[in-house]
Image (cartoon, rainbow, N blue to C red):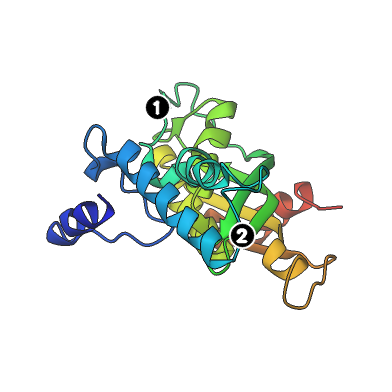
């Protein structure tokens, strides 16, 4: 099944990197088939690790659980359509800085599929032509982006792109702070290190005072 979907995406000229969404190109029943294929491949991985899944009661059903976790949960942002978000016109012509956060985010790095756990702050400067969305919708949209194998530097850009497209603000800012378990759990095993990065666009790039105001309200512990 995965080969059939890959060929469909390639024929349409659609990129399918780890942090891309392919929901539009999946047909009814194909996600279930992909999940079954992932389970079969995961079972082979466990066997290659010399784990006796036939007799070990702890790992007997691990392949199926792994498949469900990857397809339906931690990487669901690849396979599910963007959540429905109602947009409202800026009837009151609001033009002051709005800050949302910290929002908890969870993902996995594309390099080792180890967890990324962090927080995101979003700054929005609307004008009369901007759209407004409910507070919870920021969390839904950001969660949709993060539930894919990600690289933090690319994730913040995807979040900024999506919010800029939906809100049409005169300025958008995104800051992410995260723990990377590919660094905590393996490699140098430094469990105190964090990564912080940001995207500033529009007025946040042009106006240093606005940028400082946003960063002041997003001070991290």
Is residue 169 visible in the rendered image? The answer is: no
Residue 84 shows which numbered tag? 1
Report helix, strand or loop for mark 2: loop
Q: Nearer the viewer, residue 129 or 109?
A: 109
Q: Quadrant of residue 80?
A: top left
CA distance for labels 2 and 1:
42 Å
Name the residue at 70% across, 57% down: 178
Which label was assigned to residue 15?
none
Can residue 66 be seen here? The reply is yes
Q: Are marks 2 and 1 in contact (CB under 8 Å)?
A: no
Residue 155 in picture, x, y percent from top left: 52, 57
Residue 37's place in the image compared with 99, above or below, is: below
Q: Residue furthest left?
A: 11
Please provide percent x and percent y for residue 7.
17, 59
| Residue 197: % across, % down | 64, 64
Q: Nearer the viewer, residue 95 or 216?
A: 216
Q: Nearer the viewer, mark 2 or mark 1?
A: 2
Count of numbered tags: 2
For the residue pair 89 and 67, the one nearer the viewer reads as 67
* Dot 2 alpha-carbon crowd within 10 angstroms: few under 14, some 14 to 19, many 20 or more: some
User: Badge 1, how many Cα within 10 Å: few under 14, some, many 20+?
Assistant: few
The structure residue drawn at horizontal position 41% and vertical position 51%, both measured from the top left corner, is 40
Q: Secondary structure at mark 1?
A: loop
From the image, tell me which residue sits under label 2: 51
Viewed as shown, does residue 110 lie left or right of 213? left
Q: Residue furthest front?
A: 55
Task: Decide if residue 124 is on the left or right side of residue 118.
Answer: left
Quadrant of res 180:
bottom right
Q: Residue furthest bottom?
A: 188
Residue 202, percent across and down?
49, 56
Q: Residue at x 82, y 71 (%)?
A: 190
Which is nearer the N-term, disc 2 or disc 1?
A: 2
């Amino acid at each position: 099944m995965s080969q059939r979907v890959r060929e469909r995406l390639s024929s349409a000229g659609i990129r399918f990197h780890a942090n891309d969404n392919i929901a539009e190109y999946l047909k009814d029943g194909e996600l279930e088939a992909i999940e079954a294929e992932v389970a079969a491949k995961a079972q082979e991985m466990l066997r290659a690790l010399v784990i006796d899944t036939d007799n070990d009661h702890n790992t007997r059903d691990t392949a199926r659980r792994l498949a469900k976790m990857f397809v339906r949960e931690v990487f669901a942002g690849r396979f599910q359509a963007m959540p429905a978000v109602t947009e409202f016109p800026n009837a009151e012509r609001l033009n002051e800085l709005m800050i949302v956060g910290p929002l908890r985010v969870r993902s996995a790095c594309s390099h080792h599929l180890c967890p990324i756990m962090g927080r995101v702050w979003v700054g929005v400067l609307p004008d009369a032509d901007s759209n407004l969305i409910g507070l919870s919708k920021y969390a839904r949209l950001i969660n949709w982006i993060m539930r894919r194998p990600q690289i933090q530097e690319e994730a913040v850009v995807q979040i900024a792109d999506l919010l800029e497209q939906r809100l049409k603000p005169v300025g958008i800012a995104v800051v992410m702070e995260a723990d990377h378990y590919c660094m905590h759990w393996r490699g140098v095993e430094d469990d105190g290190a964090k990564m912080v990065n940001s995207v500033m666009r529009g007025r946040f790039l042009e106006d240093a005072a606005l940028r400082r105001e946003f960063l002041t309200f997003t001070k991290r512990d």
